[in-house]
Image (cartoon, rainbow, N blue to C red):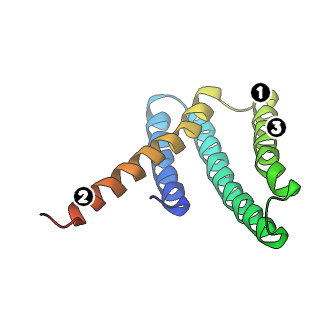
Amino acid sequence: MPTIQAIQRTTIVAAMFVAAVLLIKASPASAAGCILGAALMVANLTALSWTVRTMFALARQASGVNALGVIAAPLKMLLLAGVVYLIVKTGRVNLPGFIAGTLTQIAAIFIEVGRTSIREKLSAPSC
């Protein structure tokens, strides 16, 4: 399985590549929007990691399900949606660039899953 850190690294590399293309082909505003979108996705993965660790720690302490642990992930998503809303609402961000930046995380997930799968197939003993 790919790690959160590997997905974040790949997201950053993909965003830098996409931003460079946008800088050349489109505009500096779209490149900046791309970097902002990717940065938000990297921050989202970091928050997801913290949320999951907190949920497991709370569950261990309570020896089972904890109400705070159950609502932590939806609250994180609500916070993310609020941040995206505020970014879009300001009107100062190039939306196509921002969307391209957020999509780099999906691309990074596919890349990391593919790399992990290929690595496992190459290292598997042959019969």
Residues packed near mark 1 inside 10 Å, few (<14), some (14 to 19) or many (20 plus): few
The C terminus - image quarter: bottom left
Q: Which residue is tagged 1? A: 91
Q: Which residue is tagged 3? A: 82
Q: Residue 107 placed where, x, y %?
A: 46, 41
> Who is closer to the viewer here, 80 or 95?
80
Nearer to us: label 2 or label 1 = 2
The N terminus - image quarter: bottom left
Q: Which residue is tagged 2? A: 121
Nearer to us: label 1 or label 3 = 3
Q: Residue 14 placed where, x, y %?
A: 46, 47
- Residue type at mark 1? Gly
Q: Residue 46 placed where, x, y %?
A: 66, 58
For the residue labelled by badge 1, is the local secondary structure a helix, a strand or a loop? Answer: loop
**Nearest to N terminus: mark 2 or mark 1:** 1
Q: Residue at x 54, y 31 (%)?
A: 27
For the residue labelled by badge 3, is the local secondary structure a helix, a strand or a loop? Answer: helix
- Residue type at mark 3? Gly
Residues packed near mark 3 inside 10 Å, few (<14), some (14 to 19) or many (20 plus): few
Position above or below: 25 against 113: above
